[in-house]
Structure formats: C-alpha cells, structure tokens
Image (tube, helix red, strand yellow):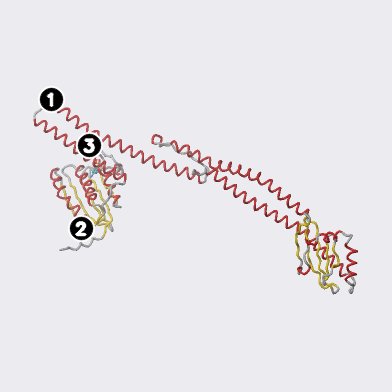
C-alpha cells in the first residue's frame, strides 16, 4: 500500500491532536459550567433548609405535631419555597407535603434513608428538578426530615445549549484546523519539493549542478548542505574515474600504435631474416611493456573496487627482501650501478607477502631507473620504535620538492619523455602507496634534485612468531 505523503500525514496528526484538545477543552468547560450552575441551585436549596431550621426553632418548645403541621401549612402552602417541600417528624408522621409532591410520591426518598444532607437531580413529569434531603435534629426535642426541591430546567437548558454550540462549532474549527495544518505543512515542506526536482535532474553529464542552497537555518538547510557535500564527493570520485579511464586509454594507445607502425614498416617490402628478427624483438618488447601496464591498471582497478583480497599472514621481511637481492644485483651489474643491501634484522609484519615483494620491487625499480651510471642504490631494513622501516636509497636524479607531493598520483611522471623511454606510466608509486595503506603503514620520500632520493616505508611490526612444531 502506498504511504501517504508527509504533508498529508502531518495534517492528519495536527487534526487528531487538535480534535483531542478541543474535546478535552469542551468537556472541561462543560463540567465547570455544570458545577457552577448546580452550585448556585444547591446553595439556594441549602438556604431553604436553613430557613426551615430557623422556622422550627421559632416554634413553641412543646408544640404538638398537629400544631407544627398547622404552622408549616400556614407558612409554606402559599409561599414559593413550599411548592416542592415535604417534612416528616421522627415518628414518620407527615408535617407538610406540597401538592406537587403529593401527586408524585414515587420521586421521593423514604425518610429512613436520609442520614446526611444529600443533593440529587431528578426528572419528574419530564421536567428537571434538584432536590435536597436533610435531617434537622434536636429542634425543640424533635428531628425533622426535610426534602425540598427547585426546578432545574434552566440549568439543563443552559447546559444543553452550551453543548450544542460546542457541537456546532467543532466541525468548523476542525475544518479550518485541517486547512491551516495542510497549508502549514505544504509551506514547511515546499523546499523539499524544490530539492527533489533538482536532485532528479542530476546525472552523469551534469554532476557539477548543485541543489538550491537553503538559508532556513533548520534541518532542511542541513539536509541540502549535506546532499551538496555528497554531490561534491561523488563528482570528484566520478572525475577521478573518468580521468583514470582517459589516462589509461592514452597510455595504452602509445605502445599499441608503436607495435602497429613497426609491423607495417617491416611488411612494406621484403627483408632479410635479421631485419625481421630485429623488428619482432621490438614488437615483443612493446608487447611486454603493454602487458606490464595492463597488469598495473588491473591492480589499481581491483584496488578501487575493493576486490583485491589481501592474504594477511606474519611475513618475515628479512626473508622477503633477501629473496629479491640476487635479482637486483644482476640488474645493477647490467646497468653498471653499485647495489648494496642491509637486511639482517629479524622483523615480522602482518601482511601479504606477494604485495610486500611488489612494493619493494617498485621502489627498487624506480631507484635503478632514475639513477644514471655510475651511481649507488642501497636497500635497508631496520626498526624504528614499534615499526619496521624499509628504505631504498639512491644517488640518482632526485625529485624537486614540488614534484615530491605529486609523484604518488596516478599517471604522474616528473619528466614525461624520460619516463616513457624508461617504460614507466606513472603508476608504480600509486600502487606502492595503496599497498602501504593496506598494511596501515606510511610511505615517505626525501630527495634533492641531482643528489638522489630516499623512499622509506614504515610498517607496524608484530612479535616474532614461535616456530611451528616439527611433526615426524
Ligand atoms: P614510473 O612508472 O613512471 O616510474 P612511478 O609512479 O613509480 O611511475 O613514479 C612517478 C614519478 O616519480 C616518476 O616518473 C619519476 O619521475 C619519479 N620518481 C620515482 N622514483 C624516483 C627516484 N627514485 N628518483 C627520482 N625520481 C623518481
């Protein structure tokens, strides 16, 4: 089932609360009015009882019941307060009963049920009355039971009029409350509609558009600001990806067109075997570079998508780096460079052995690439506090301070032409940085142009694991 809009829900809530408040208020007012009106009538009745007390006290001390009967009749039968009066003495004998009560015996309480003053509303012959039942004790040696009433038609009429006014105005009030509530909620939520309209239009081609900036200083402003910040982040991520795709295509196009040109030129006319061989050797070299580039691109793409799973285990850095030394020594000989390594400390980190090997290879490869002969490359492994530090020092071309902050960016090469001739696409250090980040480490560079560079990687160490038991 489709949910109602927030505007309609707010209106319904507003209406429900308003109706409840109106009900409570109306009932409260009605009860107060009723209480006040009956209090006026009840005071009148109590005064009548007091008048009777004064009347009986004024009678002779030893007056007989018959005499009292006569006196009361004389005083009350023609007076208004006697219209609904009835008086008994303790013997149960009737002293006075008005004509009205005579005719409506059933309306009265038996005298023995009246212990203390009691006020009651009654309807007799379709008319409303209020009665008081009271005992007047110890008056000239007698106890009188008095019942007297007054018509309460006016009270009932006023109350019922008040009730009808309430019922008459309630729907009008509720209707205007509903209208007002709906208008208020529409007004409060109209900026949301504006946000929705703009948000609906934001797509890949206009990611730079932003939601209307609200200056309401409330939750809606916070919402629009937060959505705009989110769009900022999405836009820069989107730009990074499009930039990456553009750079990657550009980098791939160069070796592929080299391969094509080489093949086309070679096939233009018949050649000697040696020429074909030379040409194929060039093609193979470019193909190998392209494969290496694709490998790097794939690594970064997997890293971005979070699919490059790390196989974290205790890694013996001395062994990992030690295994690389011989290979790089041969490269050093070929390039006429001096290579030394100091990796003799027992240092373990929690990491992925393959990735850590790749990290060292990237740093060493750069050191060799950017150090002209004669020069020096040195690999070291040591501890610094709780961390293991791998450093690769070279006496190569060095990096300016300005470039040092950019070399970890993807596709950044200090010297584009030199980088390409050495086979680098500017991805090595970006991959190295990702590997270090995955190991919760830090990578830093110190360098001076013309004097060489030092790349150092700090990784958190773990205790040397106990050797696993040998099973025979
Ligand atoms: P590349 O594959 O081009 O070497 P990297 O990301 O590994 O890409 O390096 C980025 C840039 O940083 C390189 O183009 C190079 O200019 C510079 N660089 C990296 N390592 C060194 C170094 N040891 N000495 C001098 N420059 C370096």
Helix, strand, or loop for circle 3?
Answer: helix
For the residues bearing labels 1 and 2, Cβ distance under 8 angstroms: no
- What is the crowding at mark 2: few (fewer than 14 residues within 10 Å), some, or many (at least 20)? some
Q: How many marks?
A: 3
| Outermost residue toward the top in this view | 269
Residue at point 67%, 52% (across, down): 26
Query: CB at mark 2 closer than 8 A to ligand 1?
Result: no
Residue closest to the eye, 228 or 469? 469
Q: Quadrant of residue 127?
A: bottom right
Q: Check disc 1 and report the residue beneath it.
A: 269
Left or right for 198, reference 246: right
Q: CA distance from mark 1 to mark 2?
A: 61 Å
Residue closest to the eye, 55 or 410? 55
Q: CA distance from mark 1 to mark 3?
A: 30 Å
Answer with mark 1 or mark 3, whichever residue precedes in sequence. Answer: 1
Q: Check disc 2 and report the residue beneath it.
A: 345
Left or right for 294, reference 4: left
Q: Quadrant of ligand 1?
A: top left
Residue at point 46%, 39% (across, down): 211
Q: CA distance from mark 2 to mark 3?
A: 37 Å
- What is the crowding at mark 3: few (fewer than 14 residues within 10 Å), some, or many (at least 20)? some
């Amino acid at each position: 089932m489709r949910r109602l809009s927030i505007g309609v829900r707010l209106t319904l809530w507003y209406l429900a609360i308003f109706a409840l408040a109106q009900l409570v208020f109306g009932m409260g007012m009605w009860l107060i009015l009723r209480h006040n009106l009956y209090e006026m009538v009840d005071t009148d009745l109590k005064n009548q009882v007091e008048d009777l007390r004064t009347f009986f006290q004024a009678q002779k001390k030893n007056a007989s019941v018959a005499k009292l009967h006569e006196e009361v009749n004389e005083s009350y039968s023609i007076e208004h307060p006697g219209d609904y009066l009835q008086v008994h003495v303790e013997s149960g004998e009737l002293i006075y009963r008005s004509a009205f009560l005579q005719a409506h015996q059933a309306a009265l309480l038996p005298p023995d049920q009246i212990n203390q003053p009691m006020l009651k509303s009654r309807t007799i012959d379709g008319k409303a009355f209020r009665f008081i039942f009271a005992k007047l004790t110890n008056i000239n040696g007698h106890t009188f039971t008095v019942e007297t009433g007054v018509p309460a038609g006016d009270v009932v009429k006023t109350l019922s009029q008040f009730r009808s006014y309430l019922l008459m105005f309630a729907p009008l009030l509720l209707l205007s409350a509903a209208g007002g509530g709906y208008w208020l909620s529409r007004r409060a939520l109209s900026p949301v509609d504006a946000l929705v309209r703009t948000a609906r239009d934001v797509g890949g081609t206009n990611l730079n558009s932003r939601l209307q900036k609200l200056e309401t200083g409330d939750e809606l402003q916070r919402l629009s600001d937060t959505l705009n910040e989110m769009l900022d982040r999405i836009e820069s991520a989107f730009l990074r990806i499009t930039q990456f795709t553009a750079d990657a295509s550009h980098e791939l196009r160069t070796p592929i067109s080299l391969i094509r040109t080489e093949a086309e030129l070679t096939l233009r006319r018949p050649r000697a075997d040696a020429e074909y061989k030379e040409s194929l050797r060039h093609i193979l070299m470019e193909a190998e570079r392209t494969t290496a580039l694709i490998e790097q691109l794939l690594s970064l793409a997997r890293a971005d998508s979070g699919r490059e799973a790390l196989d974290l285990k205790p890694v013996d850095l001395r062994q990992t780096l030690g295994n690389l030394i011989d290979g790089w020594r041969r490269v050093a000989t070929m390039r006429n460079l001096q290579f030394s390594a100091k990796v003799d400390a027992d240092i373990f980190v929690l990491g992925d052995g393959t990735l850590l090997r790749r990290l060292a290879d990237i740093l060493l490869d750069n050191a060799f690439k950017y150090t002209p002969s004669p020069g020096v490359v040195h690999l070291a492994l040591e501890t610094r506090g709780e961390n293991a530090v791998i450093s690769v020092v070279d006496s190569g071309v060095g990096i300016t301070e300005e470039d040092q902050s950019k070399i970890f960016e993807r596709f950044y090469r200090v010297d584009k032409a030199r980088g390409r001739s050495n086979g680098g696409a500017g991805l090595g250090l970006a991959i190295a940085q990702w590997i270090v980040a995955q190991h919760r480490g830090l990578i830093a560079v110190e360098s001076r142009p013309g004097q060489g560079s030092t790349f150092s990687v700090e990784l958190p160490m773990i205790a040397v694991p106990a050797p696993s038991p040998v099973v025979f």
